[in-house]
Structures are given as structure tokens and as C-alpha cells.
């Protein structure tokens, strides 16, 4: 049976993920670096050393075909897609072979832009974002399980 993996350090949807997974009795595996402590009583939690992409590599080493990964990290998403996992971000966007190259390109351009000017952070999360994520994750789980 597939597992849900979560790039959990800054994941705003952990409670939604647990709520949905518990109903379907799906295993969740959350990954954090050492600067976080987390226990929801349901998820398996792995703490990895704090370091550049340490959580990403720990997740990729566990992923198997048909697992679900929840992340906003395009690089991690690309590695997961290469392993034939399903990947969704915290707003409900499903990453796939058709959109990942463009997303990686936009990320590279944004990094260049940030070097040359002051930019704002991400928009504040809304209830609409949570609803979109919940709907997409539920649908993805229904398709897989």
C-alpha cells in the first residue's frame, strides 16, 4: 500500500493531511530537520540533520512507485516524479511531467530576480487554499487507493 510522505518543515497542511489519511488508514511519514519537534499521534516522524537538502534526500530515498509526496519544493518534486511517485503542493497543484520543467525554470528565474531586487514573501494562506488542497489530495487518494 502506498504511503504519504510530507516535506514537513514548513508544511501548512499537516492537520489536513492527517485528517484525510486517518479516515482511509493511510500511513503518513513526515520529515523534519533538527530544528523542529512534531508529534500528532498518528504520523511517523523522521528527524534528519539540518543541512542543505538533507530532508529532500531522506524523503527521496524512501519513496516508492505510487507513493504520494506533499511538498512545495520543485527540485524535490522533480526527483519524486523520476521515482514515479505522485506529487502535490500545499495549494493543491499536482506536479507532473508536463509542468515540472516550466516550474523549475520559473524557480531559477525567481532566484535570479531576488538577487537583484527586494521581493515580498509568499501570499498569506487562505481557507480557499486549504479547501483546494483538501479537495485535490482527497481526489488523488481516491484515484490511487
Image (cartoon, grey):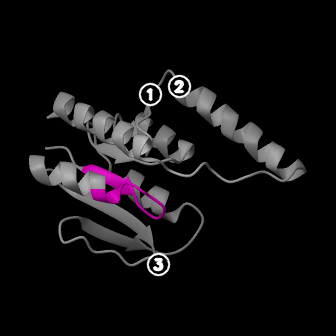
Q: Which residue is mark 1?
A: 96
Residue 83 visible in the picture? no
Neighbor class of circle 1 (other Cα within 10 Å; few <14, some 14-19, many 20+) is: some
Viewport quadrant of the C terminus: top left
**Figure disc tally:** 3
Q: Image check: 104 left or right of 64? A: right
Residue closer to the observer: 69 or 64: 69
The span picked out in magenta is: 4-15
Gap between marks 3 and 2, in whole Å? 32 Å
Q: Which residue is mark 2?
A: 99
Tell me which corner region of the image, top left, top right, bottom left or bottom right, holds residue 22. Answer: bottom left
Secondary structure found at label 3: loop
Q: Is residue 64 above or below residue 98?
A: below
Q: Are marks 2 and 1 in contact (CB under 8 Å)?
A: yes
Residue 124, x across and y down, in percent: 56, 52
Of all residues shown, which one is farthest toward the front? 127
Q: Image check: 66 left or right of 59? A: left
- Mark 2 or mark 3, which is nearer the start of the sequence? 3
Residue at point 47% right, 24% down?
97
Q: Is 7 one of the magenta-colored residues?
A: yes
Residue closer to the observer: 48 or 124: 124
Gap between marks 1 and 3, in whole Å? 30 Å
- Mark 3 or mark 1, which is nearer the start of the sequence? 3
Neighbor class of circle 3 (other Cα within 10 Å; few <14, some 14-19, many 20+) is: some
Viewport quadrant of the N terminus: top left
Residue 18, x across and y down, in percent: 23, 57
Residue 34 is tagged as 3
Q: Are marks 1 and 3 in contact (CB under 8 Å)?
A: no
Amino acid at each position: 500500500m502506498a504511503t504519504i510522505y510530507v516535506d514537513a518543515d514548513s508544511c501548512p497542511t499537516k492537520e489536513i493531511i492527517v485528517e484525510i489519511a486517518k479516515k482511509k488508514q493511510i500511513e503518513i511519514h513526515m520529515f523534519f530537520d533538527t530544528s523542529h519537534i512534531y508529534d500528532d499521534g498518528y504520523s511517523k516522524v523522521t528527524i534528519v540533520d539540518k543541512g542543505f537538502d538533507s530532508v529532500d534526500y531522506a524523503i527521496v530515498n524512501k519513496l516508492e512507485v505510487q507513493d504520494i509526496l506533499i511538498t512545495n519544493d520543485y527540485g524535490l518534486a522533480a526527483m519524486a516524479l523520476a521515482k514515479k511517485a505522485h506529487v502535490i503542493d500545499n495549494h493543491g497543484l499536482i506536479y507532473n511531467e508536463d509542468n515540472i520543467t516550466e516550474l523549475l525554470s520559473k524557480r531559477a528565474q525567481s532566484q535570479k530576480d531576488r538577487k537583484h531586487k527586494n521581493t515580498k514573501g509568499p501570499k498569506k494562506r487562505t481557507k480557499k487554499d486549504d479547501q483546494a488542497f483538501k479537495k485535490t489530495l482527497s481526489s488523488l487518494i481516491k484515484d490511487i487507493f
